[in-house]
Amino acid sequence: MTEQTTNETRLLSPKKVILQLIGFAIGAALLIWCIKLAISGGDWSKLADADPLLIAALLGCTCVSLFINGTTFWITAQPIKQMNLWDLQRLNLACNLLNYAPIRAGAIARVLYHMRLDKLSLLQVGAWFAAIAYIMAIGVGACLAATLIRVNLDWVWAVIVIGLLILGGLLTRVIISHRLFAKYGQGVDRILLNHKAYWIATVLRLIDLGAFVGRMAAAVAILDLTEQLQPHHLVILAIVAFAARLIPLGRVGFAEFAVTALAARLATLGMQGATIDAVINESGPWAQLALVESAGEALILIPTGAIALIWLRKRWITKSK
Protein backbone atom coordinates (compact mmCIF):
# COMPACT_ATOMS: atom_id res chain seq x y z
CA MET A 1 0.00 0.00 0.00
CA THR A 2 1.46 3.36 -1.05
CA GLU A 3 1.72 6.36 1.26
CA GLN A 4 -0.94 8.21 -0.75
CA THR A 5 -3.35 5.26 -0.51
CA THR A 6 -2.71 5.08 3.23
CA ASN A 7 -3.45 8.80 3.64
CA GLU A 8 -6.64 8.48 1.58
CA THR A 9 -7.77 5.57 3.74
CA ARG A 10 -7.26 7.66 6.87
CA LEU A 11 -9.70 10.26 5.57
CA LEU A 12 -12.45 7.63 5.56
CA SER A 13 -11.52 5.63 8.66
CA PRO A 14 -14.49 3.95 10.42
CA LYS A 15 -14.03 6.13 13.50
CA LYS A 16 -14.18 9.35 11.45
CA VAL A 17 -17.17 8.14 9.45
CA ILE A 18 -19.09 7.24 12.62
CA LEU A 19 -18.26 10.64 14.15
CA GLN A 20 -19.47 12.39 11.01
CA LEU A 21 -22.70 10.40 11.00
CA ILE A 22 -23.35 11.27 14.64
CA GLY A 23 -22.70 14.93 13.86
CA PHE A 24 -25.05 14.79 10.89
CA ALA A 25 -27.79 13.25 13.05
CA ILE A 26 -27.39 16.03 15.62
CA GLY A 27 -27.45 18.68 12.90
CA ALA A 28 -30.53 17.15 11.30
CA ALA A 29 -32.33 17.18 14.68
CA LEU A 30 -31.40 20.85 15.15
CA LEU A 31 -32.66 21.68 11.66
CA ILE A 32 -35.98 19.91 12.32
CA TRP A 33 -36.30 21.89 15.57
CA CYS A 34 -35.75 25.15 13.67
CA ILE A 35 -38.27 24.19 10.99
CA LYS A 36 -40.91 23.38 13.61
CA LEU A 37 -40.32 26.72 15.33
CA ALA A 38 -40.53 28.58 12.03
CA ILE A 39 -43.73 26.82 10.97
CA SER A 40 -45.47 27.42 14.28
CA GLY A 41 -44.26 30.97 14.95
CA GLY A 42 -43.13 32.52 11.67
CA ASP A 43 -45.12 34.84 9.42
CA TRP A 44 -44.66 33.31 5.97
CA SER A 45 -46.87 35.89 4.28
CA LYS A 46 -43.94 38.31 4.53
CA LEU A 47 -41.83 35.98 2.44
CA ALA A 48 -44.59 35.63 -0.15
CA ASP A 49 -44.91 39.43 -0.40
CA ALA A 50 -41.14 40.09 -0.38
CA ASP A 51 -39.64 42.76 -2.62
CA PRO A 52 -38.00 41.02 -5.63
CA LEU A 53 -34.94 43.25 -5.16
CA LEU A 54 -34.45 41.85 -1.66
CA ILE A 55 -34.71 38.30 -3.02
CA ALA A 56 -32.13 39.24 -5.67
CA ALA A 57 -29.87 40.68 -2.97
CA LEU A 58 -30.24 37.49 -0.91
CA LEU A 59 -29.19 35.30 -3.84
CA GLY A 60 -26.64 37.77 -5.20
CA CYS A 61 -24.72 37.82 -1.93
CA THR A 62 -24.45 34.04 -2.14
CA CYS A 63 -22.99 34.29 -5.65
CA VAL A 64 -20.40 36.80 -4.43
CA SER A 65 -19.52 34.63 -1.43
CA LEU A 66 -19.05 31.47 -3.51
CA PHE A 67 -16.85 33.25 -6.05
CA ILE A 68 -14.77 34.88 -3.34
CA ASN A 69 -14.31 31.55 -1.57
CA GLY A 70 -13.04 29.86 -4.71
CA THR A 71 -10.74 32.79 -5.47
CA THR A 72 -9.30 32.62 -1.95
CA PHE A 73 -8.27 29.00 -2.53
CA TRP A 74 -6.69 30.00 -5.84
CA ILE A 75 -4.66 32.98 -4.61
CA THR A 76 -3.34 31.15 -1.55
CA ALA A 77 -2.28 28.16 -3.68
CA GLN A 78 -0.01 30.23 -5.91
CA PRO A 79 3.08 30.21 -3.61
CA ILE A 80 3.08 26.38 -3.52
CA LYS A 81 1.59 25.38 -6.90
CA GLN A 82 0.10 27.10 -9.95
CA MET A 83 -3.56 26.17 -10.34
CA ASN A 84 -6.35 27.20 -12.69
CA LEU A 85 -8.78 29.73 -11.18
CA TRP A 86 -11.88 28.37 -12.92
CA ASP A 87 -11.05 24.78 -12.02
CA LEU A 88 -10.93 25.82 -8.38
CA GLN A 89 -14.21 27.72 -8.76
CA ARG A 90 -15.94 24.61 -10.10
CA LEU A 91 -14.29 22.43 -7.46
CA ASN A 92 -15.46 24.86 -4.77
CA LEU A 93 -19.07 24.65 -5.95
CA ALA A 94 -19.03 20.85 -6.15
CA CYS A 95 -17.39 20.41 -2.74
CA ASN A 96 -19.70 22.90 -1.03
CA LEU A 97 -22.66 20.94 -2.32
CA LEU A 98 -21.12 17.63 -1.21
CA ASN A 99 -20.70 19.07 2.28
CA TYR A 100 -24.46 18.71 2.73
CA ALA A 101 -23.90 14.94 2.76
CA PRO A 102 -23.84 13.03 6.07
CA ILE A 103 -20.04 12.58 6.10
CA ARG A 104 -19.05 16.07 4.88
CA ALA A 105 -17.98 14.54 1.60
CA GLY A 106 -16.99 17.88 0.12
CA ALA A 107 -14.02 18.36 2.44
CA ILE A 108 -12.84 14.81 1.71
CA ALA A 109 -13.33 15.22 -2.05
CA ARG A 110 -11.36 18.48 -2.02
CA VAL A 111 -8.41 16.85 -0.26
CA LEU A 112 -8.45 13.81 -2.55
CA TYR A 113 -8.69 16.02 -5.64
CA HIS A 114 -5.56 17.97 -4.74
CA MET A 115 -3.68 14.83 -3.75
CA ARG A 116 -4.51 12.85 -6.89
CA LEU A 117 -4.81 15.50 -9.57
CA ASP A 118 -2.50 18.25 -8.29
CA LYS A 119 -0.01 15.77 -6.81
CA LEU A 120 0.15 17.44 -3.42
CA SER A 121 0.85 15.43 -0.29
CA LEU A 122 -1.68 15.23 2.52
CA LEU A 123 0.61 17.40 4.66
CA GLN A 124 0.87 20.03 1.93
CA VAL A 125 -2.92 20.14 1.50
CA GLY A 126 -3.32 20.36 5.27
CA ALA A 127 -0.81 23.21 5.48
CA TRP A 128 -2.56 25.07 2.64
CA PHE A 129 -5.98 24.73 4.27
CA ALA A 130 -4.51 25.69 7.65
CA ALA A 131 -3.12 28.89 6.12
CA ILE A 132 -6.57 29.72 4.68
CA ALA A 133 -8.20 29.03 8.06
CA TYR A 134 -5.63 31.22 9.80
CA ILE A 135 -6.21 34.14 7.42
CA MET A 136 -9.95 33.73 7.87
CA ALA A 137 -9.59 33.73 11.65
CA ILE A 138 -7.57 36.95 11.55
CA GLY A 139 -10.14 38.72 9.37
CA VAL A 140 -13.23 37.47 11.18
CA GLY A 141 -11.60 38.03 14.57
CA ALA A 142 -10.75 41.63 13.66
CA CYS A 143 -14.35 42.36 12.61
CA LEU A 144 -15.82 40.70 15.70
CA ALA A 145 -13.43 42.50 18.06
CA ALA A 146 -14.15 45.84 16.37
CA THR A 147 -17.91 45.23 16.67
CA LEU A 148 -17.59 44.45 20.37
CA ILE A 149 -15.46 47.56 20.90
CA ARG A 150 -17.45 49.93 18.70
CA VAL A 151 -21.18 49.37 18.27
CA ASN A 152 -21.61 51.92 15.48
CA LEU A 153 -20.41 50.66 12.09
CA ASP A 154 -18.69 53.90 11.14
CA TRP A 155 -15.20 55.06 10.17
CA VAL A 156 -13.93 54.46 13.70
CA TRP A 157 -15.07 50.83 13.43
CA ALA A 158 -13.30 50.55 10.07
CA VAL A 159 -10.08 52.01 11.53
CA ILE A 160 -10.18 49.48 14.36
CA VAL A 161 -10.61 46.63 11.87
CA ILE A 162 -7.73 47.85 9.72
CA GLY A 163 -5.51 48.36 12.76
CA LEU A 164 -6.20 44.85 14.03
CA LEU A 165 -5.52 43.39 10.58
CA ILE A 166 -2.18 45.19 10.34
CA LEU A 167 -1.26 44.02 13.83
CA GLY A 168 -2.25 40.48 12.91
CA GLY A 169 -0.14 40.66 9.75
CA LEU A 170 2.92 41.87 11.65
CA LEU A 171 2.58 39.18 14.31
CA THR A 172 2.12 36.58 11.60
CA ARG A 173 5.41 37.52 9.94
CA VAL A 174 7.25 37.37 13.25
CA ILE A 175 5.84 33.95 14.14
CA ILE A 176 6.03 32.33 10.70
CA SER A 177 9.57 33.60 10.07
CA HIS A 178 10.85 31.14 12.66
CA ARG A 179 13.06 28.51 11.06
CA LEU A 180 10.84 25.67 12.33
CA PHE A 181 8.05 26.76 9.96
CA ALA A 182 10.45 26.77 7.03
CA LYS A 183 11.61 23.27 7.95
CA TYR A 184 8.32 21.62 8.89
CA GLY A 185 5.60 23.96 7.60
CA GLN A 186 4.95 22.04 4.34
CA GLY A 187 4.43 25.36 2.54
CA VAL A 188 2.37 27.24 5.14
CA ASP A 189 5.28 29.65 5.60
CA ARG A 190 5.44 30.37 1.86
CA ILE A 191 1.75 31.27 1.84
CA LEU A 192 1.64 33.40 4.97
CA LEU A 193 4.93 35.18 4.19
CA ASN A 194 3.88 35.94 0.63
CA HIS A 195 2.58 39.53 0.75
CA LYS A 196 0.39 39.15 -2.33
CA ALA A 197 -1.25 35.91 -1.25
CA TYR A 198 -1.69 36.93 2.39
CA TRP A 199 -3.16 40.39 1.93
CA ILE A 200 -5.31 39.61 -1.12
CA ALA A 201 -6.72 36.60 0.74
CA THR A 202 -7.36 38.81 3.78
CA VAL A 203 -9.29 41.35 1.69
CA LEU A 204 -11.21 38.55 -0.02
CA ARG A 205 -12.23 37.12 3.36
CA LEU A 206 -13.51 40.55 4.43
CA ILE A 207 -15.56 40.75 1.22
CA ASP A 208 -16.82 37.22 1.87
CA LEU A 209 -17.91 38.20 5.37
CA GLY A 210 -19.52 41.31 3.91
CA ALA A 211 -21.53 39.06 1.58
CA PHE A 212 -22.72 37.08 4.62
CA VAL A 213 -23.74 40.33 6.32
CA GLY A 214 -25.56 41.39 3.15
CA ARG A 215 -27.43 38.10 2.94
CA MET A 216 -28.39 38.33 6.61
CA ALA A 217 -29.54 41.93 6.14
CA ALA A 218 -31.64 40.92 3.12
CA ALA A 219 -33.26 38.10 5.11
CA VAL A 220 -34.00 40.48 7.99
CA ALA A 221 -35.56 43.01 5.61
CA ILE A 222 -37.63 40.34 3.82
CA LEU A 223 -39.09 39.20 7.16
CA ASP A 224 -39.51 42.79 8.41
CA LEU A 225 -37.37 42.25 11.50
CA THR A 226 -35.27 45.40 11.16
CA GLU A 227 -36.77 47.05 14.25
CA GLN A 228 -35.71 44.18 16.52
CA LEU A 229 -32.11 43.92 15.30
CA GLN A 230 -29.48 46.66 15.07
CA PRO A 231 -26.88 46.86 12.22
CA HIS A 232 -24.07 45.60 14.48
CA HIS A 233 -26.27 42.62 15.39
CA LEU A 234 -26.26 41.64 11.73
CA VAL A 235 -22.45 41.57 11.73
CA ILE A 236 -22.42 39.29 14.77
CA LEU A 237 -25.09 37.01 13.29
CA ALA A 238 -23.22 36.84 9.99
CA ILE A 239 -20.00 35.89 11.76
CA VAL A 240 -21.80 33.14 13.66
CA ALA A 241 -23.46 31.84 10.47
CA PHE A 242 -20.08 31.98 8.72
CA ALA A 243 -18.27 30.10 11.48
CA ALA A 244 -21.01 27.53 12.12
CA ARG A 245 -20.87 26.38 8.50
CA LEU A 246 -17.27 25.31 9.09
CA ILE A 247 -18.08 22.92 11.94
CA PRO A 248 -16.36 19.65 10.92
CA LEU A 249 -19.20 17.46 12.24
CA GLY A 250 -21.56 18.56 9.48
CA ARG A 251 -22.97 21.50 7.57
CA VAL A 252 -26.68 20.85 8.13
CA GLY A 253 -28.52 22.32 11.13
CA PHE A 254 -25.72 23.85 13.18
CA ALA A 255 -25.73 27.26 11.48
CA GLU A 256 -29.53 27.44 11.58
CA PHE A 257 -29.61 26.60 15.28
CA ALA A 258 -26.83 29.07 16.13
CA VAL A 259 -28.50 31.93 14.23
CA THR A 260 -31.89 31.17 15.79
CA ALA A 261 -30.55 31.08 19.34
CA LEU A 262 -28.31 34.15 18.97
CA ALA A 263 -30.91 36.26 17.15
CA ALA A 264 -33.45 35.54 19.91
CA ARG A 265 -30.87 36.55 22.51
CA LEU A 266 -29.84 39.74 20.71
CA ALA A 267 -33.48 40.76 20.37
CA THR A 268 -33.85 40.65 24.16
CA LEU A 269 -31.01 43.05 24.90
CA GLY A 270 -32.33 46.05 26.80
CA MET A 271 -35.67 44.40 27.53
CA GLN A 272 -36.91 43.57 30.99
CA GLY A 273 -38.69 40.70 32.77
CA ALA A 274 -41.65 39.13 31.04
CA THR A 275 -40.80 40.76 27.72
CA ILE A 276 -37.54 38.83 27.57
CA ASP A 277 -39.33 35.59 28.41
CA ALA A 278 -41.85 36.26 25.67
CA VAL A 279 -39.18 36.76 23.01
CA ILE A 280 -37.23 33.67 24.08
CA ASN A 281 -40.34 31.51 24.12
CA GLU A 282 -41.52 32.83 20.77
CA SER A 283 -38.48 32.10 18.63
CA GLY A 284 -40.45 31.40 15.46
CA PRO A 285 -39.37 34.57 13.61
CA TRP A 286 -35.72 33.94 14.45
CA ALA A 287 -35.89 30.34 13.26
CA GLN A 288 -37.55 31.67 10.13
CA LEU A 289 -34.70 34.17 9.72
CA ALA A 290 -32.12 31.38 10.01
CA LEU A 291 -33.93 29.25 7.43
CA VAL A 292 -34.38 32.10 4.94
CA GLU A 293 -30.70 33.05 5.24
CA SER A 294 -29.70 29.42 4.75
CA ALA A 295 -32.10 29.02 1.82
CA GLY A 296 -30.45 32.02 0.16
CA GLU A 297 -27.32 29.92 -0.03
CA ALA A 298 -28.91 26.58 -0.93
CA LEU A 299 -30.98 27.97 -3.82
CA ILE A 300 -27.78 28.99 -5.60
CA LEU A 301 -25.47 26.23 -4.40
CA ILE A 302 -27.66 23.21 -5.25
CA PRO A 303 -28.07 23.84 -9.02
CA THR A 304 -24.58 25.28 -9.60
CA GLY A 305 -22.99 22.59 -7.42
CA ALA A 306 -24.84 19.86 -9.32
CA ILE A 307 -23.46 21.17 -12.62
CA ALA A 308 -19.97 21.39 -11.11
CA LEU A 309 -20.27 17.80 -9.89
CA ILE A 310 -20.67 16.65 -13.51
CA TRP A 311 -17.43 18.47 -14.37
CA LEU A 312 -15.69 17.03 -11.31
CA ARG A 313 -16.67 13.47 -12.22
CA LYS A 314 -15.44 13.85 -15.81
CA ARG A 315 -12.17 15.46 -14.72
CA TRP A 316 -11.61 12.83 -12.04
CA ILE A 317 -12.09 9.99 -14.51
CA THR A 318 -9.93 11.62 -17.18
CA LYS A 319 -7.02 12.58 -14.94
CA SER A 320 -7.05 9.35 -12.93
CA LYS A 321 -6.43 7.18 -16.00
Image: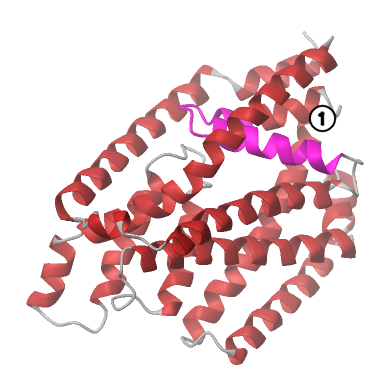
On whether residue 210 falls in the magenta region, the answer is no
Identify the residue at image location x=60%, y=91%.
Answer: 156
The answer to whether any part of residue 180 appears in the image is no
Provide the residue designation for mark 1. 121
Q: Position of residue 140 (x, y in %)?
A: 59, 66
Identify the residue at image location x=26%, y=65%.
Answer: 264
Q: Secondary structure at mark 1?
A: loop
Residue 212 horizontal side relative to residue 227, left or right: right
Q: In the image, what residue type sits under mark 1?
A: Ser
Magenta span: predominant SS is helix
> Which sits in the foreground, 200 or 185?
200
Does 217 appear above or below 21?
below
Point out the residue furthest to the left here: 274
Does 305 appear above or below 48?
above
Q: How many numbered discs sit on the rendered protein?
A: 1
Q: Position of residue 160 (x, y in %)?
A: 63, 85
Quarter-of-image position of residue 195: bottom right
Report the colour scheme.
Answer: secondary structure
The magenta region covers 84-108
